[in-house]
Amino acid sequence: MDTRKRENIKIGQTVDIVLKKDQRTGELTRGIVKGILTKSSFHTHGIKVILESNQVGRVKVIIE
């Protein structure tokens, strides 16, 4: 599923994101989507979300 399209990201989904501090290494952080921060329907680097743990990053993998 394309993680660059906002329509594919739903609140309550489990996803892997890249935090701002991990962009160089590409380390992924898993969590449950609490909110979607990207307003546009498409973003080339991935849709930015906030997790229930209050971590913010761009979605790289949708787990379900």
Image (tube, grey):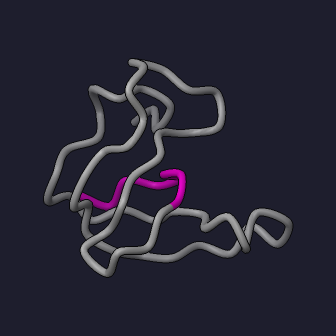
Q: Identify the main secondary structure in magenta.
A: strand
Check if residue 55 falls in the magenta segment.
Answer: no
23 left or right, relative to 34:
right
Which residue appears farthest toward the top when viewing the image? 41
Q: How many labels, in total?
A: 0
Question: Residue at position x 47%, y 39% from top?
Answer: 47
**Image x and y of residue 6, in percent:** 35, 29
Question: Residue at position x 85%, y 66% from top?
Answer: 24
In the figure, 58 relative to 23: above or below? above
Which residue appears farthest toward the right when viewing the image? 24
**Image x and y of residue 50, in percent:** 36, 61
36 left or right, relative to 2:
left
60 left or right, relative to 8:
right
In the figure, 32 relative to 53: above or below? above
Quick one: quadrant of the N terminus?
top left
43 left or right, relative to 15:
right
**Image x and y of residue 27, in percent:** 68, 75
Which residue appears farthest toward the bottom when viewing the image? 53
**Image x and y of residue 15, in percent:** 36, 62
Question: Residue at position x 42%, y 20% from top?
Answer: 40
Question: Residue at position x 16%, y 51% from top?
Answer: 11
Give, as a single range, the part of the protein colored magenta: 57-64
Quick one: quadrant of the C terminus?
bottom left
In the figure, 28 relative to 42: above or below? below
Check if residue 62 falls in the magenta segment.
Answer: yes
